[in-house]
């Protein structure tokens, strides 16, 4: 009955790739769930198959085992159920900022007029309307990522995947972006699964953090982040913040079991 | 003002070179006493062009018609062929060698055969121009379609874009700049191949006119039509280049460099 309150459920998801000398296991049975309106982060050492996991959730690659459920439906191997924000902004260079947002909404099935109205409305709401008719090449990296986030936020799919969205930005821009995203997300709660390399980023943004091991990836720990919302950047001075940071750091650096 | 100055600076050297060349030609012919039927001086060519202007225009009209229909048809065929080869799995690999092969058959050889099959009407000549024009368009277009950024492709698949949406919203817009470089090459070939087609069998057109002029040792008429052909070719090229500027407006502007 209460199934549908899970925005996303992964049931023992496995993936291995064929290679010389047998199969190489990348994901060794991942089970996790994200509640409606919950912000969950996945953190793991490099090469722990986080990108592969996203490809499976997005329906781009076949699973070696397990199931993907969204909104109480089995969506294993089906595309089109997620709003996606990749590491590189991935804006079409021949479309304006508004045009790029429109495109994502149209592909999700919203008609052109509505898509345009929604894009215009929201660009104004987050004070980016000055950029509505600019082409992506005229924007800074941080600004491109804001557009990329807004595009995902406005997409009607029930679930948002953020794939290391700030990984390519410099440290200062990254901090500003985290704060910006936090503010917008807290005002417009969506179910989010974020992959990140940054422990601070995960602690600042998420309700829950899932720590993965190196390949074959399994879930090492699941941490409920105790800080109240709305959160502030000054959180990092909190002793509890640093204790959790230390804990996750150690979990990431322990030898593979 | 700065802009017009820099434009003048880029236009001036080639104009100067051409002017010097024409002057040398004129003087060489006059002082060297080259007979007019061998090599007429530029001034003689201009005088001849003015004298035969109505006839020249009549023939130019036929050539322009042939070149334009041939260019449009060839470009459309090239576009459609590229899209098909791209969209049908495996077709690209299977047909690409044939595509290249088709360009190695000399136009001069196909022409007479087409005339044997289809007579002296406009059709065999049109087919010849089509054959010349479709190739650069389809090859450029194919490489443009193939050149799609894998990051953007992944993004489109992640958000659930269908194969059709990927083609129309991603691959095709991405190929537009390539398409235009193919169109520009086709445009510069179109007039030339129309002239060659008229050479092989026609009763009008600049190619036909050149042929009878040269048989009559009227070198000035031949040169007048050559200049006209060059002008027509450049014009068609210019129109395509202008269309590109109007269509591809998103490309990083030059102003960005100046700042």
Image: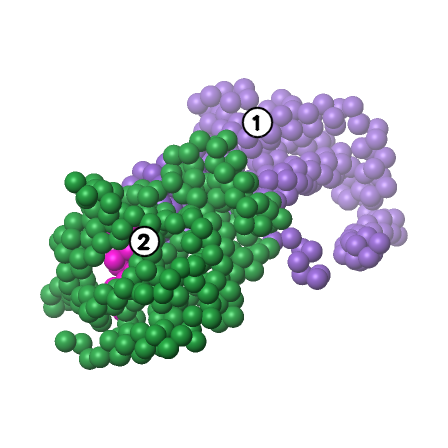
Q: Are marks 2 and 1 in contact (CB under 8 Å)?
A: no
Q: Chain of mark 2?
A: A
Q: Which residue is mark 2?
A: A38
- The residue drawn where x is 31% and y is 65% is A225
Depth check: B254 or A233 in front?
A233
Depth check: A125 or A163 in front?
A125
Q: Which chain is purple?
A: B
Q: CA distance from mark 2 to mark 1?
A: 61 Å
The answer to whether residue B136 is magenta is: no
Tag 1's secondary structure? helix
Q: Position of residue B18 (x, y in %)?
A: 79, 52
Question: Which circle marks residue B69 in the picture?
Answer: 1
Depth check: B45 or B81 in front?
B81
Q: Chain of mark 1?
A: B
- Looking at the image, can residue A154 be seen? yes
Q: Tell whether A30 sits left or right of A209.
A: left
The hue used for chain A is green
Question: Which circle marks residue A111 in the picture?
Answer: none
Give the vertical position of A246 relative to A181 (above or below).
Answer: below
The answer to whether residue A54 is magenta is: yes
The image quarter in which residue A28 lies: bottom left
Q: Tell whether B173 sits left or right of A79.
A: right
Q: Position of residue A37 (x, y in %)?
A: 33, 50
Q: Position of residue B145 (x, y in %)?
A: 43, 45
Q: Tell whether B53 sits left or right of A16.
A: right
Image quadrant holding the C terminus of chain A, namely bottom left
Q: Residues within 10 Å of mark 2 (few under 14, many from 20)?
A: some
Give the vertical position of B159 relative to A201 (above or below).
Answer: above
Question: Which range is magenta?
Answer: A47-59
- The residue drawn where x is 47% and y is 21% is B118
């Amino acid at each position: 009955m209460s199934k549908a309150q899970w925005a996303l459920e992964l049931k023992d998801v496995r993936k291995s790739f064929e290679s010389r000398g047998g199969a190489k296991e990348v994901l060794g049975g991942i089970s996790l769930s994200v509640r409606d309106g919950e912000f969950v982060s996945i953190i793991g050492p490099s090469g722990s198959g986080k990108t592969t996991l996203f490809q499976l959730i997005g329906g781009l690659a076949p699973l070696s085992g397990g199931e993907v459920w969204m909104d109480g439906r089995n969506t294993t191997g089906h595309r089109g159920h997620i709003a996606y924000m990749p590491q590189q902004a991935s804006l079409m260079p021949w479309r304006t900022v508004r045009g790029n947002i429109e495109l994502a909404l149209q592909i999700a099935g919203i008609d052109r007029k509505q898509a345009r109205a929604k894009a215009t409305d929201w660009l104004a709401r987050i004070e980016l309307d000055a950029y509505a008719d600019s082409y992506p090449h005229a924007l800074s990296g941080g600004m491109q990522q804001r557009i990329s986030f807004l595009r995902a936020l406005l997409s009607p799919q029930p679930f948002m995947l953020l794939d290391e969205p700030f990984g390519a930005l410099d440290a200062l821009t990254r901090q500003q972006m985290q704060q910006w995203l936090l503010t917008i997300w807290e005002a417009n709660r969506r179910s989010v699964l974020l992959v990140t390399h940054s422990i601070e980023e995960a602690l600042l943004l998420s309700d829950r953090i899932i720590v993965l091991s190196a390949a074959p990836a399994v879930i090492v720990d699941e941490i409920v982040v105790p800080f109240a919302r709305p959160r502030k950047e000054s959180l990092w001075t909190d002793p509890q913040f640093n204790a959790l940071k230390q804990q996750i750091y150690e979990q990431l650096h322990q030898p593979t079991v | 003002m700065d802009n017009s100055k820099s434009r003048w600076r880029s236009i001036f050297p080639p104009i100067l070179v051409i002017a010097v060349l024409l002057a040398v030609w004129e003087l060489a012919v006059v002082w060297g006493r080259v007979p007019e039927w061998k090599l007429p001086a530029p001034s003689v060519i201009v005088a001849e062009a003015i004298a035969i202007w109505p006839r020249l225009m009549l023939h130019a009209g036929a050539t322009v018609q042939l070149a334009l229909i041939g260019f449009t048809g060839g470009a459309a065929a090239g576009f459609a062929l590229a899209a098909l080869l791209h969209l049908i799995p495996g077709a690209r690999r299977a047909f690409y060698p044939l595509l290249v092969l088709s360009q190695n058959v000399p136009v001069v050889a196909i022409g007479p055969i087409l005339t044997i099959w289809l007579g002296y009407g406009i059709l065999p000549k049109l087919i010849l121009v089509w054959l010349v024009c479709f190739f650069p368009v389809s090859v450029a277009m194919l490489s443009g379609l193939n050149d799609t950024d894998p990051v953007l492709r992944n993004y489109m698949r992640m958000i659930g874009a269908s194969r059709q949406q990927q083609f129309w919203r991603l691959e095709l817009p991405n190929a537009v700049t390539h398409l235009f470089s193919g169109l520009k090459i086709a445009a510069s070939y179109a007039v030339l191949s129309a002239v060659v087609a008229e050479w092989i069998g026609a009763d009008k057109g600049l190619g036909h006119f050149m042929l009878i002029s040269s048989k009559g040792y009227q070198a000035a008429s031949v040169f007048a039509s050559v200049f006209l052909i060059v002008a027509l070719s450049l014009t068609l090229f210019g129109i395509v280049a202008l269309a590109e500027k109007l269509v591809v407006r998103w490309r990083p502007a030059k102003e960005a460099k100046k700042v």
